[in-house]
Image (spheres, rainbow, N blue to C red):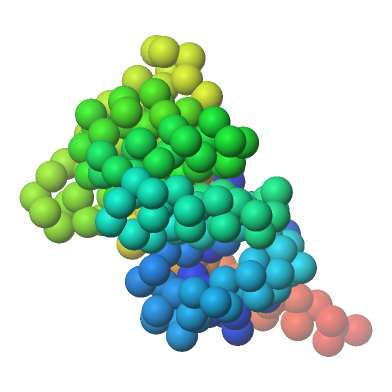
């Protein structure tokens, strides 16, 4: 099981990365903007995330043309061997992905909303694919069924492509997808905390602590 943090907030990310429970950090332009990280500060983000324990850092290229996506993707690639270039699942993005992977870049195709979008990503040599589960559901699509179908493509074809599911809001969604063979998930720090919010667990721990305190005080 591989968990990634979907944030660029250094104060939130560093303690969690240092726990050793996360394989890396994922970002996109919206996440960077929300954390006040400018494009010119991306190298600094890669540095602090890597120092805190992020084995892989995902940074998204930007631009409307293949050339722009390639140029900025090449710059992102130059930031380190542990950096994966994120590219959108558009015609320009897939074409840029093929160029980038041919040049040795690690690529994730992002903003995936339908099973058929996985096929060009496979042809482009992408290492990762990021379907947006929550946003699929918001749009009235069965996100779980779409992701299950993509996982079947991967398994049936023996593809090395890895699903890195994003837009996760509930831990039950992660558990359901794990049962389908998906093993890479990126989630916000708040979603991670939901793993530890079961009231029955909290009640059991309260009893354990009370009993431990009573036994310490026993003669």
Q: Quadrant of the C terminus?
A: bottom right
At x 28% / y 56%, what residue is drawn? 64
Q: Nearer the viewer, residue 61 or 35?
A: 61
Q: Is residue 185 left or right of residue 44?
A: left
Determine if residue 200 is in view: no
In the picture shown, does residue 41 fall above or below 126?
below
| Residue occupying the far right of the picture | 219
Residue 9, x across and y down, in percent:
53, 79
Q: How many numbered discs, if any?
A: 0
Residue 117, x across and y down, in percent:
26, 34
Q: Nearer the viewer, residue 175 or 208?
A: 175
Q: Quadrant of the N terminus?
A: top right
Q: Is residue 31 left or right of residue 112?
A: right
Residue 180, x across and y down, in percent:
39, 30
Determine if residue 67 is in view: yes
Residue 213, x across and y down, in percent:
75, 82
In the picture shown, does residue 162 fall above or below 50?
above
In the picture shown, does residue 160 fall above or below 186?
above
Q: Is residue 10 left or right of residue 154?
A: right
In the picture shown, does residue 110 fall above or below 190?
above
Q: Is residue 150 left or right of residue 8?
A: left
| Residue occupying the far front of the picture | 67
At x 42% / y 29%, what residue is drawn? 124
């Amino acid at each position: 099981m591989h968990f990634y943090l979907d944030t660029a907030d250094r104060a939130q990310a560093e303690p969690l990365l240092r726990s050793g429970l996360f394989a890396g950090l994922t970002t996109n332009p919206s996440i960077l903007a929300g954390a006040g990280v400018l494009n010119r500060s991306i190298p600094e983000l890669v540095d602090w995330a890597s120092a805190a324990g992020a084995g892989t850092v995902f940074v998204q290229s930007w631009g409307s043309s293949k050339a722009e996506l390639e140029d900025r993707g090449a710059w992102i690639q130059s930031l380190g061997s542990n950096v994966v270039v994120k590219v959108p699942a558009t015609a320009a993005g897939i074409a840029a992905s093929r160029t980038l992977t041919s040049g040795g870049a690690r690529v994730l195709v992002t903003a995936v909303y339908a099973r058929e979008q996985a096929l060009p990503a496979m042809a482009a040599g992408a290492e990762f694919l990021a379907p947006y589960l929550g946003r699929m559901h918001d749009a009235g699509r069965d996100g779980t069924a779409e992701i299950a179908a993509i996982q079947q493509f991967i398994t049936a074809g023996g593809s090395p492509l890895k699903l890195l599911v994003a837009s996760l809001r509930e831990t039950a969604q992660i558990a359901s997808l794990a049962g389908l063979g998906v093993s890479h998930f990126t989630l916000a720090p708040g979603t991670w905390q939901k793993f530890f919010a079961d009231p029955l667990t909290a009640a059991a721990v309260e009893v354990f602590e009370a009993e431990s305190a009573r036994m310490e005080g026993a003669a």
